[in-house]
Amino acid sequence: MLDTQPRLRTLEPDTDNGLYQTLLESTLAIPFRIDWASKKYTYVGPQIEALLGWSQDSWETVNDWAERIHPDERDTTVNRCVGLCLAGVDHEAEYRALTSDGSFVWVREVVHVLCDAQGETTGLIGFTFDITEQKKADQLRAELDAQKVSYARLQERLNLTHDLHDGLGGSLVHMIAAVEQGGDGGLTRPQVLSMLKLIRDDLRQTIDSNSSAQVRVPASPQEWLAPLRHRFTNLLDALDIRCDWQFAPAWRTPPDALQYLAMTRLVEEALTNVIKHSQARHVRLSFVQPEADDLVLEIEDDGVGFDVAAVDASGLGIGMRSMAVRIGRVGGVLEIDSEPGRTLLTARLALRQS
């Protein structure tokens, strides 16, 4: 099977493969052939000297190959490759190979297993590629990715700090001032309760803002409202309050994550207020998109109503202001109209098209 010059013979014996030999030895990889019965190399390309520094004669048996694999990868690589060769399975392997000067380079070996008519392994042919630069690039990308993750976490902490300072901090300052100015009479229980609700809402807003990157906007309005509808229908039915859910079948332009969270919180807060305060018998929730970049959400009930201006002036309208601030932060406006027999909340959002 061998000519006077060592060469890889994969053509028919009577075929002139001089051109093939020239092409084979002009590649940047190391071509090789192994006789499986003797476990000896019958051919190693001259590229081995340029890539690894070893002479062709120094690679005689598969033991020479195994001994020049980095100790950390040797057992795993050898055991895997031997098993696949015995099974007649073509395969690849990546490992660090020892060079003649004692250093290591990363290589990828691509192996084709030759079998006889009975399926028994008779030999191996393949190529060994130097992938050191690729591994360095992969390592650099991994380090950059790790830095990006670290930066993103730091940015999240800074955002959380700012949100707590601007949102919750401002609310606490306002409440402290209200208590100090309350005189001997102090604050009423409903006023204190409203203040505590505002703190809760500010915390909820902060949590929503800093978790929005992990939030998936539902694929349609039905998917968005389905869990809310299921959750509140049972409560409303128990109080004999009829609720109509009117919404478009699909987004014309979907909201972003923060807008989606803001609308969800608004619906939850509004329906909770209906249940607790309105004495209503009928609630209507409507969602429409009159324009592709415009979203209108309405929540209407036929309850006792309230004086919007008076409640706001009394200091008991903190919940209303919180809802308005929440919608305002995501590019929207909240309007509240109320009179005996009808209360209407209208939220309008300018959608941020991607």
Image: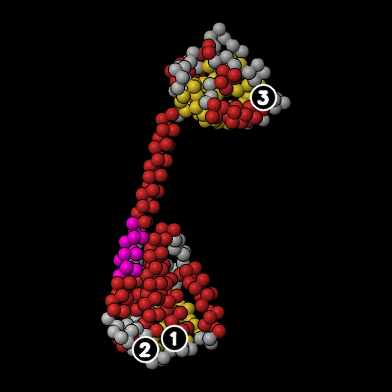
Residue displayed at 42% across by 79% down: 270
Q: Which residue lies most toward the top here?
A: 4
Q: On the picture, is 173 further left or further right than 60?
A: left
In primary-sequence order, the first of circles 2 and 3 is 3
User: Residue 98: which numbered mark, if any?
Assistant: none
Label 2 Cα neighbours within 10 Å, binned few <14 / some 14-19 / many ≥20: some
Residue displayed at 70% across by 27% down: 119
Q: Residue 331 location in percent, x, y?
A: 31, 68
User: Residue 121: which numbered mark, if any?
Assistant: 3
In the image, is residue 212 part of the stretch drawn in magenta?
Answer: no
Kind of residue at disc 2: Phe
Pointers 2 and 1 in contact (C-beta within 8 Å): yes
Q: On the picture, is 293 further left or further right than 114?
A: left
Q: Is 260 situated above or below 229?
A: above
Residue 188 placement: quadrant: bottom left
Q: Residue at label 1?
A: 277
* Residue span colored magenta: 158-171
Residue displayed at 39% across by 89% down: 305
